[in-house]
Image (tube, rainbow, N blue to C red):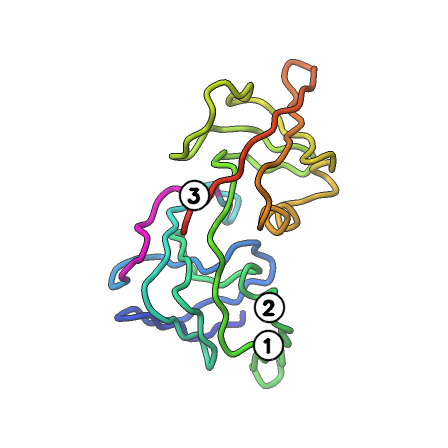
């Protein structure tokens, strides 16, 4: 598996380059990290078929990974191994030279991660529908007709099957709200949910 050395403040260690992960930078400990914005529940992830709610916060200072730099990166906390996913890797052309055990990254020397934006809703992600599990610590309108157990079958008119997690994450950047088509007791209805900054 391809690893690079990641260092930030007093923290240093190997990081898996996971091109199959839709996430960003995920550590196994926050020990030794100083934060600009304190970690909070902001994402729900799955690793090795085990789901968990991910703490996320913006670190203070530049992180080095190999010869490259992340400016004040947003960090998540999860199970091992520590990893860098598509949220960062999409900025690069990644080439694996397996015979020589090398990884080549073609792209910018420095990137800045935008604020983490989302609906504040926790989902169990299925291939054709996302089941609402609950809500993160955000100010959702109590009048919104959405509750745990509802199934999201479409977002802004695009079915979950054709949209997928990664496309939704990119679509959310710079958008003020999304319209969720919810299925409940065999019937569907639309709810417009404002997107909020989860991590500055």
Q: Nearer the viewer, residue 34 or 22?
A: 34
Where 184 falls versus 173 (above or below)? Answer: above
Q: Which residues are magenta?
A: 34-44
Q: Is residue 185 left or right of residue 21?
A: right
From the top left corner, tell me how far across and down residue 59 is, in percent: 34, 61
Mark 3 vs mark 2, CA separation in Å: 23 Å
| First of labels 2, 1 by sequence position | 2
The secondary element bearing badge 1 is classed as loop
Q: Which quarter of the figure is the N terminus placed in?
A: bottom right
From the top left corner, tell me how far across and down residue 10 is, in percent: 26, 70
Residue at 33%, 49% in the rendered image: 39
Residue 194 location, quadrant:
top right
Q: Nearer the viewer, residue 163 or 174?
A: 174
Residue 125 location, quadrant:
top right
Circles 2 and 1: CB atoms closer than 8 Å? yes
Name the residue tied to disc 1.
107
Mark 3 vs mark 1, CA separation in Å: 28 Å
Name the residue tied to disc 2.
91
Residue at 68%, 30% in the rendered image: 153
From the top left corner, tell me how far across and down residue 19 is, in percent: 59, 62
Let me know if residue 13 is in the magenta part.
Answer: no
| First of labels 3, 2 by sequence position | 3
| First of labels 3, 1 by sequence position | 3
Mark 1 neighbour density, 10 Å: few (under 14) some (14–19) many (20 or more): some
The secondary element bearing badge 3 is classed as strand
Mark 3 neighbour density, 10 Å: few (under 14) some (14–19) many (20 or more): many
Name the residue tied to disc 3.
42
Q: Is residue 174 left or right of residue 75?
A: right
Let me know if residue 42 is in the magenta part.
Answer: yes
Mark 2 vs mark 1, CA separation in Å: 6 Å
Magenta stretch, main secondary structure class: strand
From the top left corner, tell me how far across and down residue 130 is, in percent: 61, 33
């Amino acid at each position: 598996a391809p690893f690079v050395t990641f260092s930030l403040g007093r923290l240093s260690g190997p990081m898996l380059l996971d091109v199959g992960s839709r996430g960003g930078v995920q550590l196994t400990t926050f020990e030794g990290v100083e934060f600009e914005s304190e970690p909070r529940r902001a994402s729900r992830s799955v690793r090795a078929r085990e789901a968990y709610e991910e703490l996320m916060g913006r670190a203070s200072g530049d992180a080095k990974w190999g010869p490259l730099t992340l400016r004040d990166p947003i960090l998540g906390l999860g199970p091992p191994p520590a990893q860098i996913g598509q949220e960062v890797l999409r900025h690069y052309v990644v080439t694996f030279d397996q015979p020589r055990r090398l990884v080549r990254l073609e792209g910018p020397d420095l990137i800045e991660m935008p604020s983490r934006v989302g609906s504040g809703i926790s989902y169990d992600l299925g291939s054709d529908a996302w089941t609402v599990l609950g809500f993160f610590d955000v100010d959702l309108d109590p009048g919104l007709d959405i509750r745990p157990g509802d199934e999201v079958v479409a977002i802004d008119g695009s079915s979950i099957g054709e949209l997928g997690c990664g496309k939704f994450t990119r679509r959310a950047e710079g958008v003020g709200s999304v319209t969720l088509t919810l299925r409940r007791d065999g019937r569907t209805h639309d709810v417009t949910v404002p997107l909020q900054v989860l991590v500055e």
